[in-house]
Amino acid sequence: MANTTLFRPRDEKWNLAIPVVFLVAILLGVQNPAKWFSAEISTGGLIEELIVDVLLLNVTHNAFTVMMLVSFPEMREWLNRQKGGAKGFFRRAGLIFVGLSFLFGLGIAGFVPFFKELILPLSRFFPIQHALAQSLGLSLMYNGRSALLGEKTNKWVEKTERYLIWGLIALMVAAVWAATEFQIFGWTFQRLSFRTLFVASLLVSLLLMVISLLQPKSTRLNKTLFALRYPVWALSIQSPLAIWATRAIHGLEYLFVVRKMASKSRFTAWSAVAVYVLLATFLFAVLRVFYFSYASTTMDSATPTYDALLILASVSTAFSYVHYYLDRQLFLMRRKDNRELVAPLLRD
């Protein structure tokens, strides 16, 4: 099994076991986690969000990409190869961050036309695509592991897996748009049946599991267990616990990726900048969760701290979207620099 794993041995076991545990809990009818913590809806919801977004890393993992960029020697070489070098790369990321901070801050405050009706619903595509694309990338790494053992995955199997993931992304986005009553060009996604979306998503997720069973023997078991996270996504249309689970799975997946890369990197310790990035992200994540899960529902704009919380929450949200950008730049393996400098940190 050592040659068919993606992560460090203990991390591999956790990564495969966590979706199974969530899937069993969802099928047993376990209720929304918020109810576990408090009978008061707002308090329970706040605690729930703090656990999944902060402790289980759904938001705080955003810091890990920046931490790697500033502390891994391999990443410094990668930055030097980018257009304009490290300064040019961070300048572009900084401009995106500032622009998004203003967009979200002013939009939530009501100063951006069509923000809640158009821009915000459209933006919901990115976190879903980011999370499922991350899982797809990890799943395809199993194919690379089997190829090293002389057992290549059939091309049509790999292509089918890619298409199915994009189909699942489209269905998840459609479900979010239907839930938020999003409409475009006079057509509302609320006309879509949640039952139809659920059945279609479940079918796609089960097909992804079938595809995993067509993998070479060396990776078949682990890849099939890995694929159990896709039915959790389908069930998120029906179950609040499943929504919670998809976010926890995503954050922990990224933790295991970073731990694997750190074990292969030449670095000896986190630099001071990396530590500050993590602490700042942790603090902003707490304030962001507090604003969206509690303050925005219990306070109004006349509350003295409301505007400050709005600004900090917007900054944190913008940082998440910058993380999507950074991850795409770093892990898109069609790029030569990524294959030469990033991919070796993910190999055994």
Image: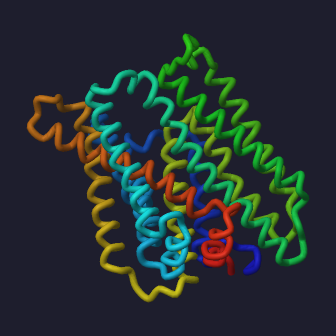
Q: Is residue 48 visible?
A: no
Name the side, left or right, on which 244 lies relative to 342.
left
Q: What residue do we see at 44% from left, 29% from top?
A: 119
Name the side, left or right, on which 61 lies relative to 222.
left
The answer to which quarter of the image holds residue 129 is top right
Q: What residue do we see at 73% from left, 43% from top?
A: 205
Name the side, left or right, on which 17 lies relative to 283.
right
Q: What residue do we see at 50% from left, 71% from top?
A: 79
The answer to which quarter of the image holds residue 332 is bottom right
Q: Quadrant of the C terminus?
A: bottom right
Q: Nearer the viewer, residue 88 or 123?
A: 88
Q: Nearer the viewer, residue 290 or 101?
A: 101
Q: Residue furthest left?
A: 304
> Picture coordinates of residue 11 (x, y %)?
58, 72
Q: Is residue 147 visible?
A: yes
Q: Quadrant of the N terminus?
A: bottom right
> Picture coordinates of residue 137 (x, y %)?
67, 59
> Picture coordinates of residue 207 (x, y %)?
80, 44
> Picture coordinates of residue 192 (x, y %)?
63, 19
Q: What residue do we see at 52% from left, 49% from top?
A: 245
- In the image, is residue 99 above or below residue 303? below
Q: Residue furthest front?
A: 84
Name the side, left or right, on which 60 lies relative to 156.
left
